[in-house]
Every structure is written in C-alpha cells, then in structure tokens.
Image (cartoon, rainbow, N blue to C red):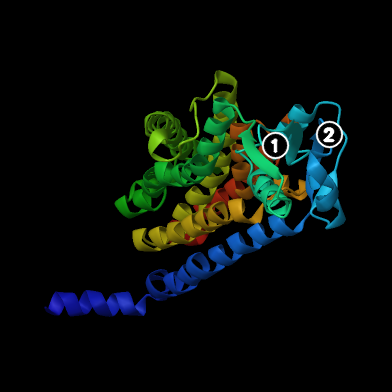
C-alpha cells in the first residue's frame, strides 16, 4: 500500500501525466461528440442549399428542369461529355427525359455518382422538385462503376489507418533508439564515437521509418482484403475492392514521405525526453495532432490549393484522392515535396537534442 501511495503521489506531481490523463480527454471528447455532428450537418445543409449542376438530355423532362431553375434549385449546364463530366465532379446529375411511360407519367432517368456525397444529395433534390410535378417520375441511376465504388469505400476507411499506423508502426523503435538508449546508458558510448551527430540521427531516423512503412504496407494489404470480402456487409451497391499497381505505388510513395515526417517528429520527442514516461506523453499528444484532423477532413470537404502545404492534412487528402482517382500528379508532387522539406528541420531539432550539453548530462 505504501508503494501505491508513493507512485500515486509521483503521478500527481507530474503535470504532463495529468494533462494526458485529464485535460486531453476533456478537450477531445467534446470535439468528437459535438463538433463532428455539427460539421456533418453543415456539410449536408451546404449540399442542399447550393444549386445542383445538371445536364438535360432528350426533352424538357416534363417541366422539371424549368421548375428547378426558377426556384434556384438547378443550374443547367452544357458540357461535351456529360458522363465523363459527372465522374470528374464538374456536374452533379444528368437528367434524361424518357418520355411518357405506359400510363400518363413521364419518366426521367437521373444519373448520378454514388461515390460522391454532392451527387447523392443532388439526386435527392431532383426527386423533391419532381414530387411537385405529378406526371413526372424520377428514376435514380448510378453511373459509378463497381471499381469506382470500391475506391470510395477504401477512401472512407484507409486514410485514417494509413496515417495512424505510420505512428504506431514506428513508435516503439523511436522510444528504443532515443530515450530507451539513454536510460540503458548506451547513448553515452554512442556519443563518444567519431561519427557526426547528424549521421547518428540519420541512422536512428531510418530505424524508425522502416518499421513504420512496413507496418503500413501490411495494413494496406490486410485492409484491402478485409473490405473486399466484407463489402457485402457494408453496402448493397455492387462494389469491386481492389488497388491497381499504380495506385498502390502512389499510396506507398505518399505514405513513405508522410512516414518520414512523422518518424522525425517521434525521434525528436524521444531524444529530448527526460524519461520514458515523458516520451510516451509526447507521443500521445502527437497521436491526437494526427488523428483529429484525419477524422475531420471528410466533414470539412477540404479542397483548397493551400492544403498541399499543411502536414498530415495534405497526405490524407492525397490518400483519398488517389483512391478515387481524383488527385493530379502536380498535387501529389507538391504534397510529397512539402512533407520532405518539413522533415529536414525536424531532423535538425533531433540532432540538436542529441548533441545538447543538457542531454549529455542526463
């Protein structure tokens, strides 16, 4: 009992432990429970309020297009290849007037892209307008292929695990080569070696990065296999879950560069920590910094050009775009380049933490 009281007293004296155990949950739970539903509701409201960009084919759809245009619900567009424009996200729906059916109703086929929330919301809005025109019947038809639907399914789950697993895959190596070596006393012998501090940090950096990338590669393979066989439990829409070689290469490329940045951050935290407990607390904060934006990105609908310069956020946006085939090569290049550039100063901080007199005294 005396040992328990002593350990409890030390824990209460450690402010970082109190922050990790009390303050972080107090801050993060309201964010997850309250802010995320609000953002989701705002996203749906924005989709319902803005005019639906549609292309009309085969007639006037029994006055449907005219009524929607007068009310500001529709914005009629003219494009050369409507189906390609729909899949590129340039329009939300294609209305095809099929003419009167066997009875007196006029059938309008509403083609939409099931993989895009804006297009799904658009076809619902078309149906709402058509409900005020008794002779018009709207038939929703999905233009997204099973492969595209599979990419959408992957994009809804994989980016979070890719980012988080880059942290989890390398955290134990980061703890071992940093504060772990310092507590074992092997760091002092390493600092007496003739190798420059930058070379020592580079070796430790690779020791953290390699297991992180290997963990992500394994997670990616298992995730694809899981969704391939379990997609029937998630959606009734025909889905083909697969990742072509080119897509896998792009994912691993961005994951490796993001892993480099996160590994450098973990190594810096580990090298400057006074104890294993302090390093673990720093890793908890780093995990939250990564996980919370990843969870919020789908709700924020991030699409601004400056996003390619925001670490972690840029990689997650790139992951989602790669999986649905909507990320140009230039955006991938900017994302990879900005993460690589940001990794360098973090490694410099790690070198400084390793070589500082205060660290040697410890």
Q: What is the number of the mark on residue 107?
A: 1
Q: CA distance from mark 2 to mark 1?
A: 11 Å
- Asked whether 238 or 32 is in front, the reply is 238
Placement of the N terminus among the 4 image quadrants: bottom left
Q: Residue at x 40, y 34 (%)?
A: 232
- Asked whether 220 or 209 is in front, the reply is 220
* Circle 1: element type: strand
Quarter assignment of residue 211: top left
Which is more N-terminal, label 1 or label 2? 2
Q: Residue at x 85, y 43 (%)?
A: 76
Total marks shown come to: 2
Q: Find out whether the residues at labels 2 and 1 contact each other: C-beta distance under 8 Å.
A: no
Image coords of residue 91 (percent x, y): 77, 39
* Circle 2: element type: loop
- Asked whether 241 or 221 is in front, the reply is 241
Dot 2, crowdedness within 10 Å: few (<14), some or many (≥20)?
some
Residue located farthest toward the front when viewing the structure as drawn: 103
| Residue marked by disc 2 | 59
Quarter assignment of residue 43: bottom right
Placement of the C terminus among the 4 image quadrants: bottom left
> Where 17 sits versus 58, above or below?
below
Q: Is residue 68 left or right of residue 351?
A: right
> Where 326 sits versus 18, above or below?
above
Q: Residue at x 55, y 33 (%)?
A: 149
Dot 1, crowdedness within 10 Å: few (<14), some or many (≥20)?
many
Is residue 235 something one can see in this rendering? yes
Image coords of residue 184 (percent x, y): 30, 50
Is residue 333 something one can see in this rendering? no
Quarter assignment of residue 189: top left
Residue located farthest toward the top when viewing the structure as drawn: 245
Image coords of residue 340 (percent x, y): 65, 39
């Amino acid at each position: 009992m005396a040992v328990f009281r002593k350990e409890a007293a030390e824990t209460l004296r450690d402010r970082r432990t109190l922050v990790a155990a009390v303050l972080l949950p107090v801050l993060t739970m309201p964010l997850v429970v309250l802010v995320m539903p609000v953002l989701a509701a705002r996203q749906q409201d924005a989709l319902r309020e803005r005019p639906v960009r549609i292309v009309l084919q085969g007639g006037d759809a029994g006055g449907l297009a005219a009524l929607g245009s007068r009310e500001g619900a529709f914005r009629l567009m003219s494009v050369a290849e409507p189906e390609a424009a729909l899949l590129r996200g340039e329009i939300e729906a294609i209305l095809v007037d099929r003419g009167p059916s066997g009875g007196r109703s006029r059938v309008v086929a509403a083609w939409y892209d099931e993989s895009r929330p804006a297009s799904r919301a658009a076809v619902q809005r078309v149906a709402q307008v058509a409900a005020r025109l008794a002779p018009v019947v709207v038939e929703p038809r999905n233009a997204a292929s099973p492969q595209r639907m599979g990419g959408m399914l992957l994009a809804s789950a994989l980016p979070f695990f890719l980012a988080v697993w880059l942290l989890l895959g390398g955290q134990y190596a980061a703890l071992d080569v940093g504060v772990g070596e310092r507590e074992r006393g092997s760091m002092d012998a390493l600092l007496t070696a003739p190798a420059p501090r930058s070379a020592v940090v580079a070796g430790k950096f690779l020791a953290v990065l390699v297991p992180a990338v290997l963990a992500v590669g394994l997670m990616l393979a298992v995730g694809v296999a899981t969704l391939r066989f379990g997609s029937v439990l998630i959606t009734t829409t025909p889905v083909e879950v697969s990742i072509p070689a080119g897509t896998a290469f792009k994912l691993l490329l961005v994951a490796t560069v993001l892993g480099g940045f996160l590994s450098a951050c973990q190594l810096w935290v580990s090298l400057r920590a006074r104890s294993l407990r302090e390093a673990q607390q720093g890793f908890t904060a780093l995990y939250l910094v990564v996980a919370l934006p990843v969870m919020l990105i789908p709700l924020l609908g991030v699409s601004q050009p400056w996003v390619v310069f925001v670490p972690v956020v840029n990689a997650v946006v790139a992951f989602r775009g790669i999986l649905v085939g909507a990320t140009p090569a230039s955006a991938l290049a900017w994302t990879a380049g900005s993460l690589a550039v940001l990794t360098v100063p973090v490694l410099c901080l790690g070198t400084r933490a390793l070589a500082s007199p205060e660290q040697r005294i410890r």
